[in-house]
Image: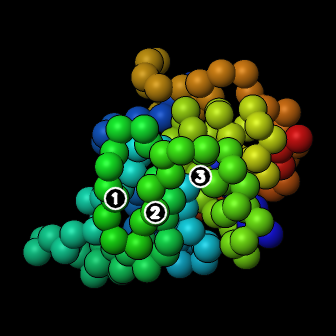
Amino acid sequence: MAKLIFGMNVSLDGFVDHDHPDFMPDEALFRFFIEMTRGIAGSIYGRKLYELMQYWDGDEPGWSPAEREFAGAWQAQPKWVVSRTLTEVGPNATLISGDVEAAVRRVKDEVQGDVDVGGTVLAQWLGERGLLDEVHMYLRPVVLGKGRPMFVGPRPKMRLLGSERVGGDVVWLRYGVG
């Protein structure tokens, strides 16, 4: 049975912003993300985050060796994309557009290992249905003051499972849900 884990970079004031320059990972954090991506059984994405992450399906000539390594790890993992508007998804991805809850429950029942959940709206929706097992926050020493909050609705009941410093200034917080 899969464990569904919602994880995001988050500012000290609770916002996620993929474009903010202070959210760019240092070398140690990027290495951490490469190894994490290699170790998961797959990812379930909402449309917006999937479209952002599709960048890694490419092969950019200016990529560093670490970026190529991440792209290879990301391309190798299965992905499920929840969307009512997309009609197709990229390689190694499955579109979920009908009964989302049933499809996610199938993934949870049939896949072994950790499955990353990407997208704040999707995570909220899954949490309301009791489908999230953990929340991981990569706490960044940045105050944004505005933007998309990590939790788009009520926060799930969580209990701290652990914390660890990653790279120069990030704290990885792991919470169990429920």
Residue 71 image position (x, y, % from top left): 34, 73
Residue where numbered disc 2 is placed: 94
Q: In 3D space, how far apart are the residues under numbered discs 2 and 1 (Cα atoms)?
A: 7 Å
Which element is circle 2 on? strand
Q: Residue furthest front?
A: 98
Amino acid found under the numbered disc labelled 1: Val
Instruction: Choose mark 3 or mark 2, whichever is in front.
Output: 2
State yes or no: discs 2 and 1 in contact (Cβ < 8 Å). Answer: yes
Where 141 falls versus 171 (above or below)?
Answer: above
Residue where numbered disc 1 is placed: 89
Q: In 3D space, how far apart are the residues under numbered discs 3 and 1 (Cα atoms)?
A: 17 Å
Residue where numbered disc 3 is placed: 117
Query: In this rendering, would 157 be left or right of 150?
Result: right
Where 96 falls versus 63 (above or below)?
Answer: above
Residue 101 image position (x, y, % from top left): 67, 45
Which element is circle 3 on? strand
Q: In 3D space, how far apart are the residues under numbered discs 3 and 2 (Cα atoms)?
A: 14 Å
Amino acid found under the numbered disc labelled 3: Val
- Dividing the picture into quarters, in which one does residue 161 lie? bottom right
